[in-house]
Image (tube, rainbow, N blue to C red):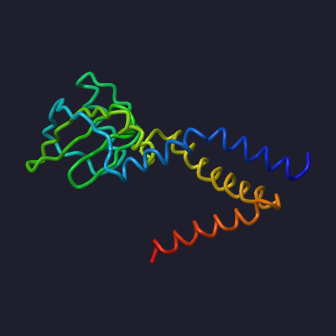
Amino acid sequence: MNSRKLWINIHLVFAAIFMPLMLMMPITGSLYLLGYQGDQTKTEVFRIHETAPNDEMEREEFFRKHLAAQGIDPTFEYIRSTKTEFIMRPTTRVYYVANIESDKTLIISRVEPTMLKRLIELHKGHGPRAMRWFEAAFGLALIITTLSGLWLAWTVKPYRMITLSAFGAGLLIMLVCLF
């Protein structure tokens, strides 16, 4: 297989495999920037009158124990904590959050995101661990797909000026927006 045909195949396979993400990322990103961020329903489930441990592993076990005691399957992968809450991720499905009240009471709530909110959370990298690896691979594949597309366009003489002009315009717009 000659070099050009190999690069066409690489370009096509990567583009096809990652097409769902290539579409989802700009759609959700644009909607988010336009103010459509999705909604979620938050319902209080129970309260814990204890302080959550500081150690990450102990904290995960603490919340798993309390969720299980309420008959809730504690299927979160990890906990993202802030000063006022503990978010049990991934947040691309129904999940739980513990808000810290002023008296140190933990209010555990069930959060049900809409489909748009789930997709935006996926876009932000808040999905399952396997999806985060797929998204990292997507980033690399997007670079390869883009560069191979530029190279393939450059190898066709009538496309060279269009390719160079369009690439230059995109680069100029980006640089102007940076400064």
- Foreground residue, 85 or 14? 14
Q: Is residue 11 above or below residue 160?
A: above
Could you tell me how many numbered marks the image carries?
0
Name the residue at 46% across, 38% down. 128
Q: Is residue 72 left or right of residue 75?
A: left
Question: Residue 108 placed where, x, y %?
Answer: 20, 36
Q: Is residue 71 above or below residue 33?
A: above
Q: Is residue 42 left or right of residue 38?
A: left
Spot the residue most to the bottom.
179
Spot the residue most to the right.
1
Spot the residue most to the left.
103
- Foreground residue, 169 or 69? 169
Question: Residue 174 placed where, x, y %?
Answer: 52, 69
Question: Residue 49 placed where, x, y %?
Answer: 13, 39
- Foreground residue, 105 or 176? 176
Q: Is residue 90 left or right of residue 102?
A: right
Name the residue at 76% across, 57% down. 153
Q: Quadrant of the C terminus?
A: bottom left
Name the residue at 74% across, 55% down. 148
Question: Residue 165 placed where, x, y %?
Answer: 66, 68
